[in-house]
């Protein structure tokens, strides 16, 4: 068998021996009742699922970029595993979003064929640390991200949308491990040598301007009172955990002001940092170069 | 007419692609086998949301049941309640240990905020080779999402441990 390009060789959708998996999965919600809860606007629910799904998708991609760059094999494997968990959460949430909006889009088209301004992730998730191999940077990012996401998912298990509640309940178990991993490394680096302490502290200081955005409300959330989680409710638990970790790590919880968006618009409104365009051009490159391929 | 008891026992023989010493039933992933208008409906639940083996499990279930003479097979996913390592059967735990993988202890249960674990896990994990209790965690993550990597301080062998979730 001969092919014109490498992707065609793996594009046989029904080839049981296929060795690469990127698109063309079966619907991860197959058999799950995805009808809308009563009184809920499908577009609002879709917008909310996109926010949480994009957070997971973009953070997952950032972790995947650490493959071959981690300081130890164990951490290479850990970051890849955490990235895979988040990718799984993203698949379920994007699929839920696609079904709720009812436009015929899929998890694949949402991940690979939306442009930067259509992504709804918080800017914290898109910050780049792999290009400078800043391991303290990815640990700080993961500590903040997973502490916030765990608090969010735990509350989301009470959502009136049974699909979101079920996705959240699975996510809670996974993100508990992610937070512990990041917290343990924060302590190891913070309470390590003078140099590792200083690197860990500057990593936290550098991303702190993007922390405020995690707790800002949004009109979509306000329209989904018993479905979505109000972000400001998460701040106390978040501060509590960060204080606990930083104190064990002999670090100072930063107090930098939040980085403003553009006219008050931030990641949740599709306004991103400069890093986002580079991330998407890499993440979407294969799907866009071979839009018909299943690989 | 589908003979449900037989269909169930056929589905129960399908093994997990990543832990082939276990059947999906041993692992607690196989939730239900029922019948709807002549179609065998198999319900499974993912261990982890990112588990890339779900598609393979679906294919294996369909093929195994078709080979046993059930032409119409449908595999459904259920997310709730979320899979717990407590669902691995006693037989499943025995098979894991026999294969050199230490089985999970009891999964944690939380009502309020989930406590942070800054130190090593408190429970004792015994070495599946020599039985020693003196083992240490090398990494909470390993070749698959469901296992951590440990080492025995007595026989010095590394081993995998199915995590408690
Ligand atoms: Zn031993």
Image: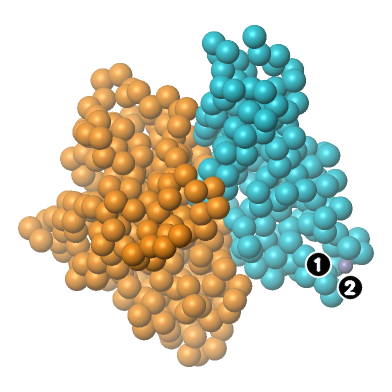
**Where is ligand 1, by quadrant?**
bottom right
**In this view of the protein, which residue sits in the foreground, B59 or B101?**
B59
Identify the residue position indicated by label 1 in the image. B135
Which residue appears at 36% of the width and 83% of the height?
A132
Q: Position of residue B79 (x, y in %)?
A: 52, 34
Quarter occupied by residue A248: bottom right
Q: Position of residue A112 (x, y in %)?
A: 28, 54
Judged left or right of residue B7, residue A198 is: left
Circle 1 — which element? strand
Q: Residue furthest front?
A: A1
Q: Mark 1 Cα within 10 Å, few/some/many (few <14, many 20+)? A: many
Chain holding disc 2 = B
Which residue appears at 18% of the width and 40% of the height?
A219
**Whole-number angstrom distance, CA of label 2 to CA of label 1:** 10 Å
Chain whose colour in the figure is cyan: B
Mark 1 close to ligand 1, CB under 8 Å: yes
Which residue appears at 58% of the width and 13% of the height?
B38
Q: Position of residue A206 (x, y in %)?
A: 31, 76
Mark 2 close to ligand 1, CB under 8 Å: yes
**In this view of the protein, which residue sits in the foreground, A228 or B9?**
B9
Give the mark nearest the N terminus, 2 or 1.
1
Quarter occupied by residue A96: top left
Identify the residue position indicated by label 2 in the image. B155
Circle 2 — which element? loop
């Amino acid at each position: 068998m001969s092919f014109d390009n490498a992707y065609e060789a793996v594009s046989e959708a029904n080839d049981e021996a296929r060795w690469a998996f990127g698109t063309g999965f079966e619907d991860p919600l197959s058999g799950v009742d995805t009808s809308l809860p009563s009184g809920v606007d499908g577009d609002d629910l879709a917008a909310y699922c996109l926010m949480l799904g994009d957070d997971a998708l973009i953070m997952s991609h950032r972790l995947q970029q650490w493959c071959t760059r981690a300081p130890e094999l164990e951490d290479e494997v850990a970051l890849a595993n955490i990235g895979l968990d988040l990718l799984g959460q993203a698949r379920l949430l994007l699929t839920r979003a696609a079904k709720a909006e009812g436009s015929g889009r899929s998890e694949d088209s949402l991940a690979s064929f939306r442009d930067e301004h259509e992504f709804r992730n918080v800017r914290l998730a898109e910050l780049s640390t792999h290009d400078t191999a800043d391991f303290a940077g990815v640990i700080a990012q993961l500590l903040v991200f997973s502490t916030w996401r765990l608090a969010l998912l735990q509350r989301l298990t009470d959502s009136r949308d049974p699909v979101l509640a079920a996705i959240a309940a699975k996510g809670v178990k996974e993100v508990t491990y992610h937070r512990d991993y990041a917290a343990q490394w924060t302590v190891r680096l913070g309470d390590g040598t003078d140099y590792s302490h200083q690197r860990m502290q500057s990593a936290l200081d550098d991303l702190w301007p993007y922390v405020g955005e995690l707790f800002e409300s949004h009109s979509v959330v306000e329209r989904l009172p018993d479905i979505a989680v109000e972000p400001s409710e998460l701040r106390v638990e978040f501060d509590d955990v960060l204080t606990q970790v930083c104190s064990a790590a002999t670090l100072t919880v930063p107090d930098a002001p939040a980085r403003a968006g553009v006219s008050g618009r931030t990641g949740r409104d599709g306004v991103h940092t400069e890093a986002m365009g580079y991330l998407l051009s890499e993440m979407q490159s294969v799907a866009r170069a071979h839009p018909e391929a299943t690989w | 007419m589908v003979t449900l008891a037989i269909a169930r026992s056929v589905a129960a023989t399908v093994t997990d692609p990543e832990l082939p010493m276990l059947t999906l039933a041993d692992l607690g992933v196989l939730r239900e086998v029922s019948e709807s208008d002549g179609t065998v409906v198999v319900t499974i639940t993912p261990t982890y949301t990112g588990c890339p083996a779900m598609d393979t499990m679906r294919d294996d279930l369909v093929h195994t049941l078709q080979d046993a003479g059930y032409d119409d097979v449908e595999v459904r996913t259920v997310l709730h309640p979320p899979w717990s390592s407590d669902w691995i059967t006693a037989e499943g735990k025995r098979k894991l240990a026999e294969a050199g993988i230490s089985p999970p202890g009891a999964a944690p249960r939380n009502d309020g905020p989930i406590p942070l674990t800054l130190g090593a896990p408190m429970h004792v994990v015994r070495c599946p080779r020599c039985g020693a209790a003196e083992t240490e965690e090398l990494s909470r993550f390993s070749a698959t999402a469901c296992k951590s990597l440990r080492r025995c301080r007595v026989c010095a062998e590394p081993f995998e441990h199915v995590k408690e979730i």
